[in-house]
Amino acid sequence: MLLARVVGTVVATRKDDRLQGRKLLVCRPVAPDGTVDGGYVVAVDTVGAGVQETVLLVSGSSARMAGGKDSPVDSAVVGIVDEVRLESESDSSSNSKRPAAVAGKSKH
């Protein structure tokens, strides 16, 4: 799974019949702190995500499963992220549950 930010949509009038009625989103992988961490990916939306939301992306067989049986999908949005919590090394060693950083808050 990858963290990504939705940065746009794709409109394709002509496409495989198994993609009819499916929303295609342009996503950019991001690091847990929200900084860009890769190029662009087009993914099928399975959860109703919107532009500027931080999402969970899956690829390969996981995306095909999320996209529907036998669908020609290599990347799918499977979750909308509310927040990301990171532990600092000192918190890990003391077994503290306090977050060191919070990123990726969604508009929900």
Image: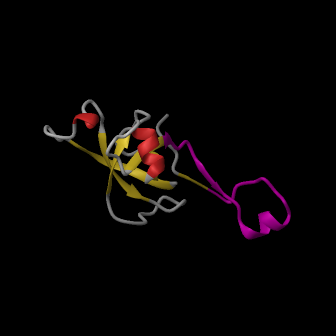
97 shown above or below 67: below
79 shown above or below 75: above
Residue 53 position within the rendered picture, expressed as x and y whole percent measured from the top left: 42, 44
Residue 26 position within the rendered picture, expressed as x and y whole percent measured from the top left: 30, 50
Residue, far left = 14
**What's the residue at 48%, 58% (across, down)?**
34
Residue 82 position within the rendered picture, expressed as x and y whole percent measured from the top left: 55, 42
**What's the residue at 78%, 69% (across, down)?**
90
Residue 46 lies in quadrant: top left
| Colour style of the rendered protein structure | secondary structure
**What's the residue at 49%, 41% (across, down)?**
80
The number of numbered badges drawn on the structure is: 0
74 shown above or below 80: below
Asked whether residue 45 is in view, the answer is yes
51 in magenta? no
Residue, far right = 94
Residue numbers of the magenta segment? 79-101
Residue 20 lies in quadrant: top left
Q: Nearer the viewer, residue 7 or 44?
A: 44
Q: Nearer the viewer, residue 54 or 23?
A: 23
Asked whether residue 56 is in view, the answer is no
Q: Nearer the viewer, residue 38 or 34?
A: 38
